[in-house]
Image (spheres, rainbow, N blue to C red):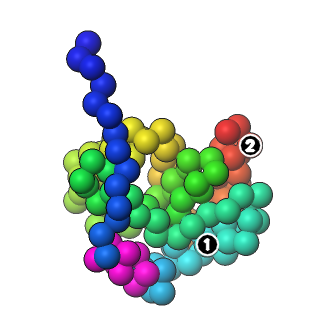
Amino acid sequence: MPPRKKVREGNVPDYMKELAQESRENPTEAEAALWEYLSNKQLGVVFWRQHCFNINGHDYRVDFYCKELKLAVEIDGPIHQFKNRDDAIREWHIEQLRIQMLRFSNEEVLASPARVARRIHTVIERL
């Protein structure tokens, strides 16, 4: 087995921070619906919206991130159906930092954000 490469989290470039800020100011309908359940430690932990990572020179952003538990939550909107390979690569890089990824579809969140929040809370209780 080849030796494992060291994974490094670097500085996030300004353009990524600006994109994240823009996304926080203009969330999708699904992001806004789920944020109602994740904000203000309602699940017992702090979540950040649109958190950015620079991993080995690659820039990534997740919809919600809990640093304390190293838990990322992604809502897959319509664009994700065309980016399966890109999403898989991004998820692999993020998981190299020992961050667990949870993925939900737009439809799932919009149909019942409370149900999605309960599923996230179940994961939180296990971590």
Depth check: 1 or 75 in front? 1
For the magenta stretch, what is the residue range?
A: 15-22
Which quadrant of the view contains residue 109? bottom right
Q: Quadrant of the N terminus?
A: top left
Depth check: 53 or 50 in front? 53
Badge 1: residue crowd in 10 Å (few <14, some 14–19, many ≥20)? many
Left or right: 11 as drawn, with respect to 44: left
Depth check: 94 or 125 in front? 94
- Measured as percent of width and height from the top left, residue 119 is found at 65, 50
Which three-letter amino acid code belongs to the residue tagged 2? Glu
Which quadrant of the view contains residue 39? bottom right
Q: Is residue 112 visible?
A: no
Mark 1 and 2 residues: CB-CB less than 8 Å, in contact?
no
Which three-letter amino acid code belongs to the residue tagged 1? Trp
How far apart are labels 1 and 2 at the CA level? 19 Å
Which residue is label 2 attached to?
125
Q: SS at mark 2?
A: helix
Left or right: 121 as drawn, with respect to 30: right
Q: Quadrant of the C terminus?
A: top right
Which residue is label 1 attached to?
35
User: Residue at (62%, 63%) from the top-left corner?
Assistant: 47
Question: Residue pushed farthest top?
Answer: 1
Q: SS at mark 1?
A: helix
- Give above or below for 78 relative to 9: below
- Measured as percent of width and height from the top left, residue 83 is found at 24, 57
User: Residue at (34%, 65%) from the top-left corner?
Assistant: 12
